[in-house]
Amino acid sequence: MMKRMAVVLAMMFPALASAEHASPLLKVPEWTRKELQKPKLKFQKKKLWNLAALPAYFLLETTIHEGSHGVAARVFGLKVTAFKPYPHKFRGTFVWGAVYTDRTLPKKEDALFTMAPYMTDIILFTSVDLLLGYRVIPPGSVAGLIVYTAGMLAPWINFVYNVNNPRSFSDFSQFSKITGMKRWALLALGDAIAAIALWRLWVRGKEVFFTAVSEKSSRFSFAPFASGDAKGVAALIRF
């Protein structure tokens, strides 16, 4: 038996609240009604001013990165001879920043020294994610925008860049040499962590950069519809 196909036009006014009023033809299933009633998100263009501050965010991230190396150096008893958290040349090669010490470390300590910035990135990223998630800092506020960019976006870019940096003196290349771990394995592990972090960036980014459109404004919504042997598309028009 050929299944019927139905297209349900649901005209919902503010005074109508139940699913039974949503369609003059068929009762709309609960999951379809919820899909139709999801708030529409609108990008807040006014927050693009934050892009002008990107150089400052990345200077801050570089300072945190090199500062983590510096703290680890001091913990392991090294003397920091130079602290340069800004772009410069090292032995004729461009680097974004560097910490210079008076001597090298044994393998175990050297591995921790090399990975210190990425431990800091993960802690900072997770902390800001929780602060925004529990609304300790409102995501839609100016403060939410700043901490999201400085505490989630910048550390993520720093992490991804360094994981995938092929140069022999990059942190992950050095860690591979120190520990004997294959570079491709570090790459796979690092990018897997970065992929999970990208999902969290998207979740928080929607809260930071988008706002729900007022229910008073006109809009169209569409969702798949299935009720018994009837299938089709449910359409919602709000006024």
Image: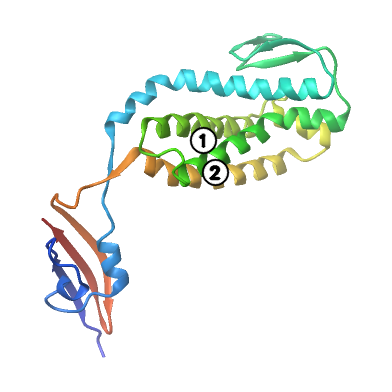
Q: Amino acid at mark 1?
A: Met
Helix, strand or loop under label 2: helix
Q: Is residue 141 left or right of residue 105?
A: left
- Return the mark for residue 50: none
Q: Is residue 123 above or below residue 1?
A: above
Q: Where, quadrant-wise, is the N terminus in this rendering?
A: bottom left
Q: Residue at x 50, y 41 (%)?
A: 131
Q: Is residue 115 above or below residue 79?
A: below
**Front-most of 76 and 55?**
76
- Which residue was labeled with disc 2? 197
Q: Amino acid at mark 2?
A: Ala
The image position of residue 212, as x and y in percent, is 27, 47
Q: Is residue 90 left or right of residue 147?
A: right
Q: Is residue 65 above or below residue 135?
A: above
> Based on the displayed image, in which of its 4 quarters is residue 227 positioned?
bottom left
The image position of residue 129, as x and y in percent, is 51, 42
Q: Is residue 160 left or right of residue 55?
A: right
Q: Is residue 206 left or right of residue 127?
A: left
